[in-house]
Image: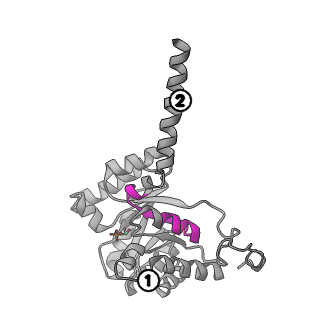
């Protein structure tokens, strides 16, 4: 860690684990859905950097069967010019490797999503050595995140909403992982997952998560402020009044 940066932080400045030298790129926004309309809407905003899916989200869209699932991933890749996480279903090393290689071959933007289990860690190492990009999912502790980084994962997905659901602190986990990764300059990107609302996004940005993935509603929530709405209403009313007085 760059100690100079840490020691010269002003009172009330960024937390000590934040080191701009290690975070040269802006936070990435991923949408967490397999719904093509929502992906299109988020992409049209011009702020979308990628998509995450999982078997539950695919099932929610009624996508089933190997061919349909693979076609759906290709459809998503054709909408978004960014990373698209596609999850393996197998839970043993051989099946994960076979599925992951097939998924990665679908499109350059595919990132193979691998669960944080023992064979998953082996698969992360295998994919990393082969140059296949990965996202380690179902991460709920700093130890799991450390292991994923050691195994060469490109992304690690701590599920902050699901921790909050059981009275644990999801954001505290993001802080812990940020600190650990910065200590050793791990290249693994922290992908804050299971984001449920807009404040999760803002908190993750303050902590320095590399990526957040959440629903469209959470992303669109960022643009809302009542003073923006009332201010715009007043601007337009004043403009109309002035225009009417000129034409009168
Ligand atoms: O895609 C993984 C994660 O984001 C799931 O979120 O809302 O089902 O806990 P959620």
Q: Taking 38 as reference, is 110 above or below it? A: below
Residue at (50, 18) in percent of width and height: 244
Count of numbered circles on the image: 2
Mark 2 neighbour density, 10 Å: few (under 14) some (14–19) many (20 or more): few
CA gap, disc 2 and disc 1: 62 Å
Question: Which residue carries the number 2 mark?
Answer: 238
Q: Quadrant of ligand 1?
A: bottom left
Task: Name the colouring of the figure.
Answer: one colour
The span shown in magenta is 201-218
- On the rendered image, what quadrant is the N terminus found in? bottom right
Image spot of residue 220 (x, y percent)? 43, 52
Instruction: Using the rendered view, name the quadrant where residue 84 is placed.
Output: bottom left
Residue 208, magenta (yes or no): yes
Image spot of residue 154 (x, y percent)? 52, 71
Q: Taking 197 as reference, is 119 above or below it? A: below
Circles 2 and 1: CB distance less than 8 Å? Answer: no
Residue 172, magenta (yes or no): no
Image spot of residue 100 (x, y percent)? 38, 69
Q: Nearer the viewer, residue 141 or 9?
A: 9
Image spot of residue 11 (x, y percent)? 72, 74
Instruction: Using the rendered view, name the quadrant where residue 198 is placed.
Output: bottom left
The residue at the far top in this view is 248
Residue at (45, 80) in percent of width and height: 169
Mark 1 neighbour density, 10 Å: few (under 14) some (14–19) many (20 or more): many
Question: Which sits earlier in the primary sequence, circle 2 or circle 1?
Answer: 1
On the question of residue 176 being in view, the answer is yes
Left or right? Give the position of 181 relative to 113.
right
Residue at (52, 75) in percent of width and height: 129
Question: Which residue carries the number 1 mark?
Answer: 121
On the question of residue 109 being in view, the answer is no
Q: At numbered mark 2, what does the secondary structure look like: helix, strand or loop?
A: helix
Q: At numbered mark 1, what does the secondary structure look like: helix, strand or loop?
A: helix
């Amino acid at each position: 860690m760059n100690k100079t940066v840490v020691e010269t932080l002003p009172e009330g400045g960024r937390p000590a684990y934040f080191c701009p030298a290690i975070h040269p790129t802006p936070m990435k926004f991923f949408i967490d859905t397999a719904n093509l309309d929502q992906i299109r809407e988020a992409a049209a905003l011009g702020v979308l950097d990628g998509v995450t899916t999982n078997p539950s989200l695919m099932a929610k869209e009624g996508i089933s069967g190997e061919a349909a699932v693979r076609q759906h991933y290709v459809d998503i890749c054709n909408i978004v010019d960014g990373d698209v996480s596609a999850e393996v279903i197998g839970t043993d090393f051989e099946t994960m490797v076979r599925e992951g290689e097939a998924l990665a071959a679908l499109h350059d933007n595919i990132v193979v999503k691998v669960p944080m289990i023992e064979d998953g860690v082996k698969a992360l190492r295998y994919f990393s050595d082969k140059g296949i990009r990965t996202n380690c999912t179902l991460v709920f502790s700093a130890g799991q995140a450390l292991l994923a980084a050691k195994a060469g994962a490109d992304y690690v997905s701590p599920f902050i909403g699901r921790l909050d659901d059981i009275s644990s602190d999801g954001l505290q986990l993001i802080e812990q992982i940020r600190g650990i990764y910065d200590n050793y300059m791990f290249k693994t990107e922290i992908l804050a997952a299971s984001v449920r609302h807009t404040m999760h996004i803002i908190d993750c940005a303050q902590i320095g998560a590399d990526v957040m993935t959440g629903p469209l509603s959470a992303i669109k929530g960022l643009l809302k402020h009542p003073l923006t709405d009332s201010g715009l209403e007043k601007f337009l009313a004043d403009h109309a009044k002035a225009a009417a007085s000129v034409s009168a």
